[in-house]
Amino acid sequence: MSLRIVVADDQEVIREALMTLLDLMPGIEVVGGACDGQQAVERVAALRPDAVLMDLRMPGTDGIAATTRIAEQYPGTAVVVLTTYAEEPLILDALRAGARGYLTKDAGKAEIVRAIETAVTGHTTLAPAVQRRLLDAADRPSSPAPGEETARPAALTGREEDVLRLMAEGLPNAAIGRRLLIGEATVKTHVNHLFAKLGTRTRAEAVAWAHHHGYGPAAQPPA
């Protein structure tokens, strides 16, 4: 069956072009469009799509606020961000809000469809430029403000670090298990331990933490 999606973008020309383009893709059915975040939430409430392709900077209710509401009220609908901006604070805010994908508007139609398909399965896709921004941010030294202590997670085991790196590569639990030669149920246990130690609630938040702290693809964890 086709995945039912809503496209949210305040620029009418871009929104209609995306709706037309994606509706022609196999396995995708565009069921609605929204001109701002509030309308996106309303479309989700009425249509219960599988996913929303969400712009971020829109008038009124922006994409971050809309993503937060959709993730909380309609968890069966995945949100994939499609925006012009790839700034670290915006990326982290979107992932913390519950977005399961973050693409920039130079993404091709096949990449967008893959991100939607991945998000619907509960996993996260980050555009290469977005991954680079997070890795660059992880390389920058940071120090807490005077009198402020930096929160540190409980120490991760070696196996938890392995799982976290593979999560940051976008691998689902089954693929992580095959890579590490362990069962999928064991991977799920490690993922739950990671959520508890990192203080995250979703896979997207854990992936954002991983990239921010140097556990992304081809990166080594901080000493």
Image (cartoon, rainbow, N blue to C red):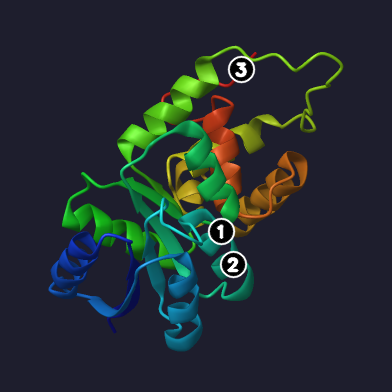
Q: Which residue is mark 1?
A: 65
Q: Secondary structure at mark 2?
A: helix
Distance from disc 2 to disc 3, alpha carbons, whole Å, reads 34 Å
Q: Position of residue 163 (x, y in %)?
A: 57, 40
Q: Quadrant of residue 118?
A: bottom left
Is disc 2 in contact with disc 1, using a CB cutoff of under 8 Å?
yes
Question: In this view of the protein, can residue 222 be seen by the observer?
Answer: yes
Farthest residue toward the right?
A: 147
124 vs 69: above or below: above
Count the numbered circles shown. 3
Q: Which residue is mark 2?
A: 69
Q: Nearer the viewer, mark 3 or mark 1?
A: 1
Residue type beneath disc 3: Pro
Is disc 3 in contact with disc 1, using a CB cutoff of under 8 Å?
no
* Residue located 48% across and 79% down the image: 42
Question: Mark 2 packing: few (<14 Cα in 10 Å), some, or many (20+)?
Answer: some
* Residue located 47% across and 54% down the image: 172
Q: Nearer the viewer, mark 2 or mark 3?
A: 2
Question: In this view of the protein, can residue 219 be seen by the observer?
Answer: no
Residue type beneath disc 2: Arg
Question: Mark 1 packing: few (<14 Cα in 10 Å), some, or many (20+)?
Answer: some
Farthest residue toward the front?
A: 60
Residue type beneath disc 1: Ala
Q: Which residue is mark 3?
A: 222
Q: Position of residue 51 (x, y in %)?
A: 40, 70
For marks 3 and 1, the one nearer the N-term is 1
Distance from disc 3 to disc 1, alpha carbons, whole Å, reads 32 Å
